[in-house]
């Protein structure tokens, strides 16, 4: 459990906010720019990546706080 303690120590609320900000920025700004340029395939990829950032960041934070 020593590795888990180190990871939990590094993953604080500041890191969560950064991860969520990256996901939201990608979802709102990058995806809309790609839609305007008619890069629909790339827009879908950007949306998937942003959802992974948002959901993955929240799940990781909650899981580490529960296991802590």
Image (tube, helix red, strand yellow):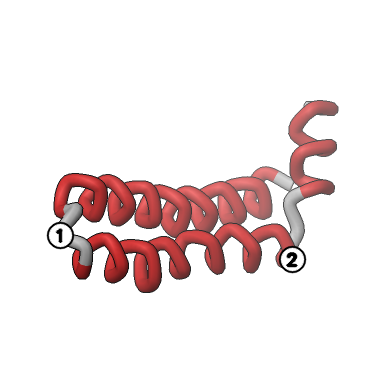
Instruction: Say which quarter of the image contains residue 8.
Output: top right
Q: Mark 2 or mark 1: which is in front?
A: 1
Tell me the residue at 79%/27% (across/down): 3
Percent of width and height locating residue 25: 46, 68
| Residue neighbourhood size for the residue with mark 2, other residues' Cα within 10 Å, grouped as few (<14), some (14–19), many (≥20) | few
Give the spatial CA distance, label 2 vs label 1. 35 Å
Judging from the image, what secondary structure is the residue with disc 1 in? Answer: loop
Q: Is residue 64 above or below residue 22?
A: above
Residue 44 in the image: state x and y as whole percent: 21, 51
Q: Which mark is residue 52?
A: none
Residue 61, compared with residue 3, is above or below; it is below
Could you classify mark 1 by the number of other residues whose Cα lies within 10 Å: few (under 14), some (14-19), or many (20 or more)? few
Q: Are marks 2 and 1 in contact (CB under 8 Å)?
A: no
Q: Report whether 26 appears left or right of 37.
A: right
Toward the front, the furthest residue is 37
Callout 2 secondary element? helix
Residue 24 picture location, percent across and down? 44, 68
Foreground pick, 22 / 11: 22
Q: Which residue is mark 2?
A: 14
- Give the left or right position of residue 5, taking residue 60 as reference: right
> Image point 17% across, 46% down: which residue?
41
Residue 47 falls in image quadrant: bottom left
* Quadrant where the image shows the N terminus: top right
Side of 25 where 35 appears, left or right: left
Q: Where is residue 28 shown, x and y percent of the image? A: 36, 72
Where is mark 1, residue-wise? 38
Q: How many marks?
A: 2
Q: Sequence-wise, which precedes: disc 2 or disc 1?
A: 2
Q: Residue at x 39, y 71 (%)?
A: 29
* Residue that appears at 37% across and 48% down: 49
């Amino acid at each position: 459990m020593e590795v888990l303690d180190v990871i939990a120590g590094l993953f604080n609320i500041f890191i969560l906010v950064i991860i969520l900000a990256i996901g939201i920025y990608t979802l709102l700004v990058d995806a809309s720019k790609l839609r305007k340029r008619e890069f629909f395939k790339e827009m879908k990829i950007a949306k998937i990546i942003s959802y992974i950032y948002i959901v993955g960041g929240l799940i990781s934070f909650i899981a580490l706080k529960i296991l802590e």
